[in-house]
Image (tube, grey):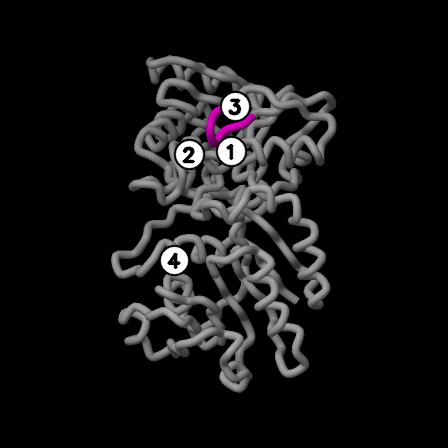
Amino acid sequence: MSQFIMITCQYGTERFLKQEILDRYHDLRTAFSRPGFVTFKTLSDWDIGRVGKIRSIFARYKGLALGRLTSDDINYAVAYVWDLAVDLRVDRIHAFPRDWGVPGAGDFEPHIDQNCIEIQNRLFHACPYRKKLGAGAEHALCPAERKEIVLDVVSVSPSDWYIGYHIAHDWRSCLPGGIVNLQRPIDSVSRAYLKFEEGLRWSGLPVHVGSRWLDIGTAPGGASQALLARGAKVIGVDPAGISPVLLQNPNFRYLRGRFNQLKRGHFRKISWIITDMNVAPNYTLDVLEDFVTQNDTSILGLLFTLKLVKWSLLADINIYMQRIKSWGYSHIAFAQMQFNRQEIMVAVQK
């Protein structure tokens, strides 16, 4: 049991995370926080199983706190961590930073930095039962296996660590800090590649070789690139121009124009939709609803962003959810990806 829960989120979304958590869990109170890192004091007993089930659009990592350490002496710090965890038998060690900035601002993208790699390495070699840790535990970026207990070190600053633990139970919680180890390819045409590559991994939507996708508002083509790299066939629709990188791919077909003005016959074989339109949420939902609810379409799933042009639109999340359910889809998930900015990702599947 623990008195505090630690949660990381995107830099700048702390107030929305706090409100979301407090509205759902009345036995929690906010405690220490920094941009990208929030702690909650518990008013009742919480175990790691319950922490793992916390529902949140903004939470990236969730764990129970063991303690806090402020020191510039890494040898002392490593010994202190294992003193804190003396009664906790773990399978793996993850060290990760809070976000230091907004994704895509300047050169910043969320990642495990060299300082945290060094922390993990020191902790691994100092572990009193090192040989009994999980396979690959010596590697700082190695994901946990499901059901493993993970010792977590959150670097709030290079000399300020929060120590906790969690149980790996889904895709995100297996990753160190819930952070995808993903870099933008040299030939990617936009950051959309990063957020949709992450979104495809998070959602588990099947992108098979030859699967047929429609990308609405595709320009300049980053989302389509993530699909094409997996062998999918993509029709991209946009009134703006497309990067020549996509036009040279034989699995990509470009239709120039507005989606609602094109003949539906172009899309008869489409089974999946991806879209990243820079418009208000209801406009995106209008476009998708008009297409997927037609009798001559059979769309198995969708992956799309909802742009929060005003943060106040978060109040309408449940309305968006009910609207999507009315289209006949039973599996719907909302989350903010680490590479999203003022937007959320939505995954929908029958």
Specify start and end residues of the magenta stretch as a single range.
34-38
Q: Secondary structure at mark 4?
A: helix
The quarter of the picture where residue 221 lies is: bottom left
Residue 193 circle label: 4
Circles 3 and 4, Cβ within 8 Å, touching? The answer is no
User: Left or right: 240 with respect to 304?
Assistant: left
Quadrant location of the N terminus in the rendered image = top right
If you read the primary sequence from the N terminus, does the residue marked by circle 1 or circle 2 appear first? 1
Disc 3 to disc 1, how far (Cα)? 10 Å
Residue at label 2?
99
Picture layout, residue 79 above or below residue 270: above
Q: Is residue 203 visible?
A: yes
Disc 3 to disc 4, how far (Cα)? 31 Å
Circles 1 and 2, Cβ within 8 Å, touching? The answer is yes
Disc 1 to disc 4, how far (Cα)? 23 Å
Q: Nearer the viewer, residue 89 or 239?
A: 239
If you read the primary sequence from the N terminus, does the residue marked by circle 3 or circle 2 appear first? 3
- Residue type at the position of mark 1: Thr
The residue shown at (31%, 60%) is 189
Residue at label 1?
8
If you read the primary sequence from the N terminus, does the residue marked by circle 3 or circle 1 appear first? 1
Residue at label 3?
33
Disc 3 to disc 2, how far (Cα)? 13 Å
